[in-house]
Image (cartoon, rainbow, N blue to C red):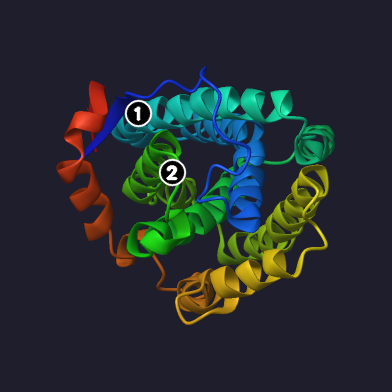
């Protein structure tokens, strides 16, 4: 047995932060801001999808998944709340969240298709794998947050640790629903394209709003962060590709850095609940 623990991060995001809060680096700030802008709508979709998925399970399986779902929902709802506060600060700074409107339109189209709930769970599992890859990379590459506002650094590392902690939940619900490989991989390909494009477009818009879109140093920073020796794309390709294996399970990804960060930074949060899984 393990636990999904619901935590309240002890930071105040109602107070303003610097426009380039991530060490003064325009690209690193714009990229993480773009991710944050996508989270509240996405996390609500994940919550709704897994609730519907667990509700569709036979009673015996539903009872077995219910406590894990409770912990997952608690963690994602807390992420959603804090990123909404974060995004409100960005709006005050003059940044335009265009990805949120696109996501809402896309979700409305999905609702209109009246898909089997397994499709929504597959989309959630695919996106959760992306966030788990990002989380592992973030926890193991401190340079991504070098010089960051301490509140923002805590937010991103805490969020990363919890994403790694619940990385198996959506996948396990999909398996419990007897979801097939064809749709699991179809939605992973779709999420790969859509998620990447959304974050890229929002990052470009953020840089435009910041007035640094055409600066050479901006794109030098982007090249280092994504393609450098410690870059996300270089380190993320292998775990991304692993999802295509029939034997794949998210627990195969190392979660030790997540556990270590949570243990070493217990003063940064308060436990408000736990669910045994």
* Nearer to us in this view, 235 or 149: 149
Give the farthest residue toward the bottom: 229
The residue at 66%/32% (across/down) is 41
Q: Is residue 264 left or right of residue 111?
A: left
Residue matched to label 2: 156
* Nearer to us in this view, 7 or 175: 7
Residue matched to label 1: 66
Secondary structure under badge 2? helix
Which x, y percent locates residue 84? 59, 25
* Nearer to us in this view, 228 or 171: 228
Q: Which of the two labelled residues, at mark 2 and mark 1, occupies the earlier sequence position?
A: 1
Q: Is residue 145 left or right of residue 18?
A: left
Which x, y percent locates residue 170? 46, 46
Near mark 2 (Cα within 10 A), the count class, few <14, some 14-19 or many ≥20, is some
Which x, y percent locates residue 172? 40, 49
The residue at 65%/53% (across/down) is 26
Q: Is residue 205 left or right of residue 242?
A: right
């Amino acid at each position: 047995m393990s636990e999904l623990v619901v935590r309240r991060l002890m930071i105040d995001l109602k107070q303003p932060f610097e426009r380039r809060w991530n060490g003064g680096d325009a690209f690193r700030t714009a990229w993480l801001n773009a991710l944050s802008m996508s989270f509240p709508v996405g996390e609500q979709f994940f919550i709704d999808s897994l609730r519907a998925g667990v509700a569709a399970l036979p009673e015996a399986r539903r009872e077995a998944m219910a406590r894990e779902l409770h912990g997952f929902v608690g963690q994602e709802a807390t992420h959603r709340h804090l990123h909404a506060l974060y995004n409100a600060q960005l709006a005050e700074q003059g940044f335009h969240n265009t990805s949120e409107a696109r996501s809402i339109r896309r979700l409305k189209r999905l609702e209109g298709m009246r898909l089997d709930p397994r499709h929504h769970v597959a989309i959630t599992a695919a996106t959760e794998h992306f966030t788990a890859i990002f989380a592992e990379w973030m926890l193991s590459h401190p340079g991504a947050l070098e010089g960051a506002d301490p509140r923002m650094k805590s937010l991103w590392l805490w969020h990363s640790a919890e994403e790694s902690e619940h990385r198996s939940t959506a996948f396990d619900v999909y398996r419990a629903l007897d979801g097939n490989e064809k749709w699991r991989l179809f939605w992973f390909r779709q999420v790969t394209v859509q998620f990447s494009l959304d974050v890229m477009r929002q990052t470009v818009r953020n840089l435009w709003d910041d007035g640094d879109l055409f600066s050479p140093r901006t794109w030098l920073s982007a090249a280092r962060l994504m393609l450098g020796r410690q870059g996300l794309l270089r380190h993320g390709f292998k775990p991304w590709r692993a999802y295509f294996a029939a034997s794949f399970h998210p627990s195969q990804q190392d979660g030790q850095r997540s556990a270590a960060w949570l243990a070493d930074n217990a003063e940064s949060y308060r436990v408000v609940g736990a669910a045994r899984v």
